[in-house]
Amino acid sequence: MIIRNFLVITTLVSAVFSSNYYTSNYALRLLFEKEVNFTLKLGALVEEYPTLEQDLPRSKTFLENPLITRESFSPEVINNPLNQYLLMWKFSHEWVYMANDMLKVSTKSDYDDTFDIVALSGEIKSSQVSEDDLAKAELSVLRVQEFYYLDPVDVIQGRVQNYSARSALSEEQTKKIVMKAKEYGDKCRVHQWGRAMEHLGMEVPDDARGVIKKPPTEEYCESISCSAGRGDGHCVTKDHYIASYQEACNNNSFKLKRSKKRNPPCFLNAIHPTQLLQPIKTEWISVNPPVYQFHGVFTHQECDEFWATGAAQQSRSTLVQKKTDGLGTTDDSRVGTNSWMRNADSSVVKMFSDRVSYATGVQTDVEVEDWQVASYGIGGHYWFHHDYLPEDSDFMGHLGNRLATFMAYLSDVPLGGATAFPNLKLSFFPAKGSALFWFNTNLNQADLPQTLHGGCPVLLGAKHIGNKWIRYKGQFLTYPCGKTPKSLPTLPASLCTYS
Ligand SMILES: O=C(O)CCC(=O)C(=O)O
């Protein structure tokens, strides 16, 4: 009895703390692993106590229809936003009911030695997904549906473009998503999803019927952005930036526009002996602000090792503030996790830093920020922003502003997840081992506002990146202060051979 009470208490305590699955690809992966393990454990219990199948009426469905099995465990399944939503639903509803039923039956006399039943019940409850967390996942589903112009009929039927989820959404789940849109005053989505429900023969929630009878106009729906806006579900007028950003993320009409004469593609010389056999291929994308793209800077294995070094320490990403109270703020304009690593942490981190130096000429040994390893959750994104720091930021310290950003893509992302620069009409889709490098300020630390950029919502896949922000202070050898107030940095000629 004492053990049982202890388990129930620890269960409740950890349930309180185990929220925020929706922001974390890593936590969701672990939750998928739990789905596999709990199903196996349940199967073993049913084998041990044959009467359990009657006493736990849900067990048959659980065993016959797990969301994932060892055999089906694959990136395509676990990184599908609808599977992630279905999993979160299961861990906020069905597994919880199952855990409660288990506790009840464990008191029956047929189960003398019920420690294993109680233990599994406790394990399940400690992984419980909170209603709040699930509500954010609903918002994420709405975000990708709106942002990538998905047909809600497809989404409800479990399709994300050409990828199928493990099952369709149920009527109850769809209703909750519609009600989430209603809660944020998003009439357009309520109408779109409500019509989709009708089309699929589902019962539309009462609260949505009015909107279906009196739909908002098409012009109105085109003029606003709700879940696709700042990502927090509130509708805003779609201004030039939002429209350009959404378009860049969808890569609809943005083609790399560059004059070959002014912007020759440039190929890196192998300036370091380790790069002799594999010089880093560099493209000069934009002069003002200076933006470069590097191809094949890191091997896939190096990317995996780098990500694995920072994966387990991930916590919710925060926004840079003027004043650093050490906590940072969180909101749904950034749905993801991150952790920080320095050269001394592991040889792979040092090797990444060295590679940044070979590719760009910056020094990465002293007076630099740590590496940020970031990852995104369901429909995870980072709303557009600048990387340079506000002038009065505490974070500026003695190192000066963030002269440049080096961003390494540690994974391929099958759908969505581009890095988009709305002002430059540019978007870059993640390719594992490639990197972007751009200057946030000129050589006199004046902000370059055209570097506005964001991480577009991930539609399908896991997006992991590594960011190295290069502060102004330690870079005077390669990037000395400019001759004129507007002098722009460029990669030193010694690093490039022009074709
Ligand atoms: O995820 C991206 O593509 C952009 C990330 C970014 O802007 C940042 O971490 O500051």
Image (tube, rainbow, N blue to C red):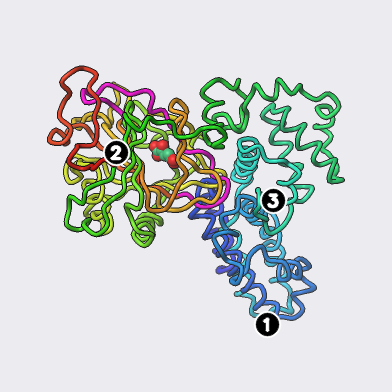
In magenta, the rendered stretch is 440-463
Instruction: For marks 3 and 2, give the CA distance.
Output: 38 Å
* Comes first in the chain, label 3 or label 2: 3
**Secondary structure predominantly adopted by residues drawn in magenta:** loop
Answer left or right for 216 relative to 366: right
Q: Taking the image as drawn, is residue 324 in sight?
A: no
In the foreground, 17 or 406: 406
Residue at mark 2: 469
Residue at 23% across / 36% down in the picture? 491
Residue at mark 1: 48
Q: Nearer the viewer, mark 2 or mark 1?
A: 2
Instruction: Tell whether circle 1 marks a residue whose Cβ is less than 8 angstroms from ligand 1.
Output: no
Crowd tier of the residue under label 3, counting other residues whose Cα lies within 10 Å: few below 14, some 14–19, many 20 or above:
many
Indicate the amino acid at tag 3: Arg
Indicate the amino acid at tag 2: Trp
Helix, strand or loop status at disc 1? helix
Indicate the amino acid at tag 1: Glu
- Disc marking residue 159: 3
In the foreground, 369 or 364: 364
Residue at 40% across / 57% down in the picture? 312
Residue 375's place in the image compared with 9, above or below, is: above
In the foreground, 109 or 39: 39
Residue 332's place in the image compared with 154, above or below, is: above
Residue 344's place in the image compared with 4, above or below, is: above
Residue 289: image location, x then y, percent: 33, 27
Considering the image in quadrants, where does the C terminus appear? top left
